Image: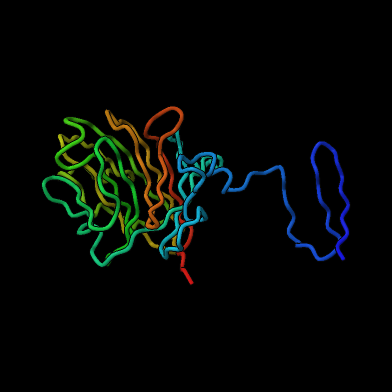
Amino acid sequence: MKKYLILSVGVVAVLCYQNCSPEAVNFSERSQEQIASENSDAEGDYGTGGGGFDCVSGQKLNVYLDPLATGVIDQNQYLGSIVSYQGEETAADNFNYFSESAHPIIGPVPIGFETNVFFYEGSDGLALTFYANIDGGGSSNNKLEIDITTEGNADQDRVLLSDDGNELKKVGEIYEGRFQYWNNTDGGVIGPFKKTSPFKIKVAILETGDIETARFYSANNFHFSLSSAITPVSSFVIANESYHTCD
């Protein structure tokens, strides 16, 4: 038989004396799920940690907004976790660059006035992929400027593909993306990232022009907005978590 003692001091606490879980509940702290749900625009779903999606095997990465571009992870800005897309092509081949634009074989479909971000794992490893706008539509003339810094990957990453030639390049320790596009896409691919490394990727958004929104996509068809209260496209930080295997 279970016995309970109920105390009432502004809140209700239930103390178990028998047959109860040994795990303590801390009512003063919000869980990652609660924080992500509060920061998400996806009707309470918060990524591969929940939301009712089918399990998808792949590299699992945590994403945090960084509105002030400090490069420091703020747990209160946690958006959720995503899983990498997977395929047989290299990351550059998966980008499927022609007509001066991205046409991804596996990954989110480009959208006008929107920036898409995701991870893809192919024959050459895990890579960060991003592009703005859409081929043959969207913005007639726009600039996107970003700085990307990587840490904890043993200097193994490099530019695997730069949309429109040399608009994405590494200058010192920073990947500089200085894009301008007319009715097409701009973006690039950076990698490979070692799945067993505690790597971190800091993305500082410098200029977005007429981009209206940015979204981070996961292989389970989940996505969340990279907008913040002060800008439609926020800087953000990605932290490697683990490889997620489904039973």
Name the side, left or right, on which 221 lies relative to 78: left
Residue found farthest to the bottom? 247
Q: Quadrant of residue 230?
A: top left
Q: Quadrant of the N terminus?
A: bottom right
Name the side, left or right, on which 225 lies relative to 39: left
Q: Quadrant of residue 142?
A: top left
Q: Horizontal and vertical percent for residue 49?
A: 52, 55
Q: Horizontal and vertical percent for residue 243?
A: 45, 64
Q: How is the image coloured?
A: rainbow
Residue found 33% across the figure and 45% down from its top: 173
Q: Tell which of 29 and 37 is nearer to you.
A: 37
Q: Tell which of 52 and 122 is nearer to you.
A: 52
**Is residue 36 depicted above or below 122 in this figure?**
above
Residue found 85% across the figure and 38% down from its top: 9
Residue found 34% across the figure and 59% down from its top: 85
Residue found farthest to the left? 99
Question: Exactly how many numbered labels are in the figure?
Answer: 0
Q: Horizontal and vertical percent for residue 31?
A: 61, 48
**Is residue 53 depicted above or below 45 in this figure?**
below
Q: Tell which of 217 and 90 is nearer to you.
A: 217
Residue found 43% across the figure and 35% down from its top: 69
Q: Horizontal and vertical percent for residue 105?
A: 23, 57
